[in-house]
Amino acid sequence: MKKLAAYQSLSALISPHCEFETDTISPEEWDELFAVANSQYLVPALYCALRDNSLLQRPPEMAVAYAHEIYSLNVERNRNLSKQLEKVVCCLNSVGVEPVLIKGAALFVEKWVPDPAARFMFDLDILVPNSQGKRALSTLLNDGYMVPDKYQQLQLEEGNHHYPPLQKKGEPALVELHIRPLSSNCRAVVTSTTLRHKAKKISLGAEANAWLPDPTEQLLLMFLHSEISHENHRFSLLDMRHAWDLPWYCRFYGDAVNWEEVEARVTVSGYQKELAGYLRLLNGFFCMPLPSILPDHASHAERHYRRVCRTLKVRRANLILIQQFIKSLQFHFSREMIEKRYGSEKVIRLQLNRIRYLLYLLGKFRKWSSLSKLVYSFRLRMRDNAGR
């Protein structure tokens, strides 16, 4: 089984919409499929799909045993995550902060996947008002949370949307404390105000109160986080772990998602092509029905789907990282970005300003320690997208 075929087979198996025939898969092809699931942190989801569709007898016995063990560990991990989330919310409530549970953290309450243990989570994302950010951070630090060594250099600069990840000894996951839901290029679409305005209040325990986003807001948040903040659309990548959420989420909420509002919001921000391309990916890989929006961008969506398929054929993650780095350089030295930085319009002046920007970068990163920080932050941002 080729790499692309393994991605397609895996996505069909774990989707709530596809009917996939497994009779023709050989033991070697099952190995490739499980390898892709492992690289995308989807082994628990694959195990649940095989179990729920009475297909556990199809893959090799050793592969099924491995998947069952990973699933069992994730059951325990998610149980501890749920307890950790409740304690974090209680801690914040003690100083008058009621957070909004965003992205995966909301799954513990909403359970849009039939078996929540099918989803593996790296961290818990919670949103607090900007005005209460420092108070919330101080409270968690006083409770024993700290910034791990590998994240010490990631400080909250002006305009960033969350503090460096926090970790507490004995707790299973990092906590990402947001003061804004998304990075600056997405703020025109989803803001703390829009999330709070439509959110519903829930209780995680006797003394733990938080808020859940409206389904339309949560869907927009999930799309923007993957395709814009993580730049998956620009780099023609499919983040399967996050993409897998959307078909289940839309199936769970159905008509509660207002697609007309989704279209209107992304149109105002100029992200119609990105949304159309993402919906085409969800349709092509997970058989998710396409909503009747953005018909004018169908051709772009189809081209994006083909580009992603070509990217998935690449076997080595380092090659994808190199491609991403080159595209990132092309973006920063593009006419649009140079003119935004220096305000030039004439061709000669544009080229001179490109040289000017290059000299600036060479001066900024003339020391190896500074360059290593740049490379580290780039790899940190891209590692999940490369399937590492």
Image (cartoon, rainbow, N blue to C red):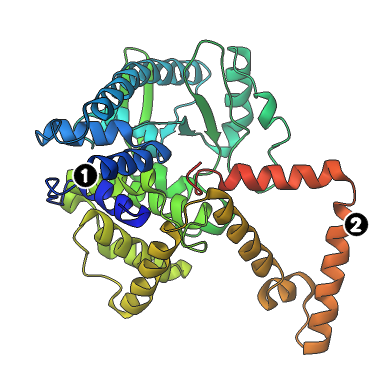
SS at badge 2:
helix
Q: Amino acid at mark 2?
A: Gly
In the displayed structure, 33 sits above or below 60; it is: below
Task: Please tell me which residue is depicted at 65% across the width and 24% down the height of the picture.
Answer: 147
Asked if disc 2 and disc 1 are in contact, CB closer than 8 Å, the reply is no
Closest to the observer: 294 or 98?
294
Where does label 2 land, which residue?
363
The quadrant where residue 101 appears: top left
Where does label 1 land, which residue?
26
**In the visual, does 193 lie left or right of 56?**
right
Q: Position of residue 39 (x, y in %)?
A: 42, 39
Q: Can residue 190 be seen by looking at this rendering?
A: no
SS at badge 1:
loop
Q: Position of residue 6 (x, y in %)?
A: 31, 50
The quadrant where residue 69 appears: top left
**In the visual, does 268 lie left or right of 55?**
right
In the displayed structure, 156 sits above or below 165; it is: below
Comes first in the chain, label 2 or label 1: 1
Q: Position of residue 177 (x, y in %)?
A: 54, 32
Q: Position of residue 260 (x, y in %)?
A: 27, 65
Task: Please tell me which residue is depicted at 64% across the width and 68% down the height of the picture.
Answer: 331
